[in-house]
Image (cartoon, coloured by chain):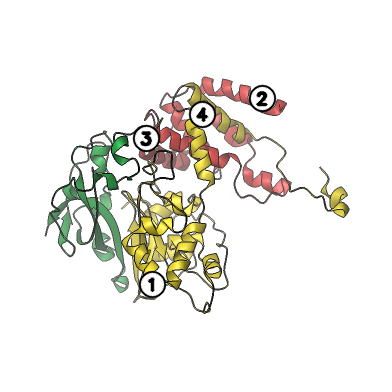
């Protein structure tokens, strides 16, 4: 596969992984065995895959940008998050073929509005529940016991590992999503964004900002890369 | 303490993880193409015959990853933990899986 | 084939919306102080161990739903009110630094887990 030969003709194809890994084979094998054993049907599985492909963090970013620009919409986000979500194209109730939400996500989104002296951050200690319909798939670090067990107990420590340090007089409010509510953080609008359009604002509200481990900045459109840290403090309490 | 499953250990040791593959081939996508289908399998399991409810699966995944698969990156570790859960719960046997892996390998490599 | 014990009821309406009105009068209101009961967990719970016996303030009545402990066994007969509760971190963890005494934790529990203080 020689990209350099095509260089002059500008026909360079996007690179592809040419080999089939043992993991790829394993995933197919597990799935097909489940279907063979009647645990779910190929159709069920396809429906999920189609749905998953539609998900991403963009709608939540847009929701925040709209709220920053419109106080009435911000109030709607507080009073009726399902309706507010519809306005960014997310239907918590009817998106899934079930027409009553997904078994993992339910239909009770809640927008946690940051204030200058109150910073929210979201975790699910029990199993890493996440507002997928509006935020897409959760990042790996969110799912680790390392994050889940430490965020409720040592939030300032964990946040500083994410590069976020907050003064003593700011209340850090950790939301542990242990039941049917799914939380999205609405951070405060950063400096240096006066006169920005909704599109411009949405671009800087990244997934990490919507979980609460980062604060939006006028100069950042992409989340920093995360390494999964080993726990400094032991598990258990 | 969870007992290792030789079939899965072998895959863990010899299988090429996505991080390495994408580096070698210069691919940008941070996730392998099968990541989404794996997630779908987890969801479908949750809804289906209730053989592996979500909270139980997640707890088991945490334990298995911690005890056996901590040196393996994500999402490969999630996949191994899932296969492991299914075997210890009797949803499939190690032999079933080994056999079907060969079938799939043959099919995918012939294409 | 989506398994559910409440398909007809929830379709087009949503879960937990479909249980609205079924829990009766709420025992607690916003602003009430409560203590988390240390009920025995039979097999399944979504009430974290670290909350047991701690005190909190009710900040929101969030929805009515069968408690997770019942729902896990397909029992949706007795929905309860669910409350969002605010805890002080210094009440939850003995070694939480006093200088951050403003820090809090918010989480939800169903009515059976709460007793008045």
Marks 1 and 2 on same chain: no
In the picture, the disc for residue B107 is: 2
Q: In the image, which is nearer the foreground, mark 1 or mark 2?
A: 1
Residue C55: x %, y % from top left: 19, 60
Marks 1 and 4, the one that precedes in the sequence: 4
Q: CA distance from mark 3 to mark 4?
A: 19 Å
Give the residue number, with chain letter if any, for mark 1. A71
Residue A22: x %, y % from top left: 62, 33
Marks 3 and 4 on same chain: no
Q: Is residue B16 above or below residue A228?
A: above
Q: Check if mark 3's residue and mark 4's residue have beta carbons within 8 Å.
A: no
Residue at image position (67%, 34%) is A20
Tell which subunit mark 3 falls on. Answer: B
Residue at image position (32%, 36%) is C7
Tell which subunit mark 2 falls on. Answer: B
Q: CA distance from mark 4 to mark 2?
A: 18 Å
């Amino acid at each position: 596969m020689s990209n350099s030969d095509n260089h002059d003709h500008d026909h360079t194809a996007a690179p592809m992984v040419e080999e089939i890994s043992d993991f790829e084979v394993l995933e197919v094998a597990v799935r097909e065995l489940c279907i063979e054993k009647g645990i779910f049907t190929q159709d069920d599985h396809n429906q999920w895959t189609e749905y998953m492909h539609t998900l991403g963090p963009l709608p939540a970013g847009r929701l925040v940008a709209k709220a920053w620009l419109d106080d009435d919409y911000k109030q709607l986000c507080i009073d009726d998050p399902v309706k507010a979500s519809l306005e960014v194209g997310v239907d918590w109730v009817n998106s899934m073929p079930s027409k009553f939400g997904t078994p993992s996500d339910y239909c009770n989104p809640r927008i946690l509005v940051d204030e200058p002296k109150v910073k929210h951050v979201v975790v699910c200690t029990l199993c890493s529940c996440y507002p997928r319909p509006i935020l897409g798939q959760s990042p790996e670090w969110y799912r680790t016991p390392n994050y889940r067990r430490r965020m409720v107990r040592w939030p300032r420590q964990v946040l500083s590992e994410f590069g976020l340090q907050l003064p003593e007089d700011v209340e850090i409010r950790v939301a542990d999503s242990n039941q049917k509510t799914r939380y999205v953080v609405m951070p405060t609008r950063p400096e240096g964004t006066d006169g920005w359009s909704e599109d411009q604002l949405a671009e800087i509200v990244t997934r990490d900002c919507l979980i609460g481990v980062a604060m939006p900045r006028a100069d950042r459109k992409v989340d920093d890369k995360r390494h999964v840290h080993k726990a400094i403090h032991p598990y258990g309490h | 303490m969870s007992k290792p499953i030789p079939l899965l250990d072998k895959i863990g040791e010899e299988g090429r993880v996505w991080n390495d593959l994408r580096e070698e081939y210069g691919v940008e996508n941070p996730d392998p193409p099968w990541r989404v289908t794996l997630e779908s399998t987890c969801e479908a399991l949750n809804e289906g015959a209730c053989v592996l409810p979500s909270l139980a699966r997640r707890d088991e995944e945490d334990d298995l990853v911690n005890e056996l698969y901590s040196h393996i990156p994500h999402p490969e570790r999630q996949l191994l933990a899932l296969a492991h859960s299914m075997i210890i719960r009797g949803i499939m046997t190690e032999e079933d899986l080994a056999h079907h892996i060969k079938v799939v390998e043959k099919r995918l490599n012939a294409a | 084939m989506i398994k559910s014990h409440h398909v007809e009821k929830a379709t087009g309406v949503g879960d937990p919306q479909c249980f609205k009105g079924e829990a009766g009068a709420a025992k607690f209101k916003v602003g009430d102080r409560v203590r988390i009961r240390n009920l025995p967990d039979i097999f399944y719970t979504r009430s974290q161990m670290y909350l047991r016996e701690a005190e909190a303030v009710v900040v929101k009545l969030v929805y009515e739903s069968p408690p997770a402990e019942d729902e896990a066994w397909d029992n949706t007969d007795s929905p309860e009110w669910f409350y969002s509760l605010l805890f002080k971190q210094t009440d939850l963890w003995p070694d939480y630094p006093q200088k951050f005494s403003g820090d809090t934790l918010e989480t939800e529990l169903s009515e059976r887990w709460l007793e008045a203080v």
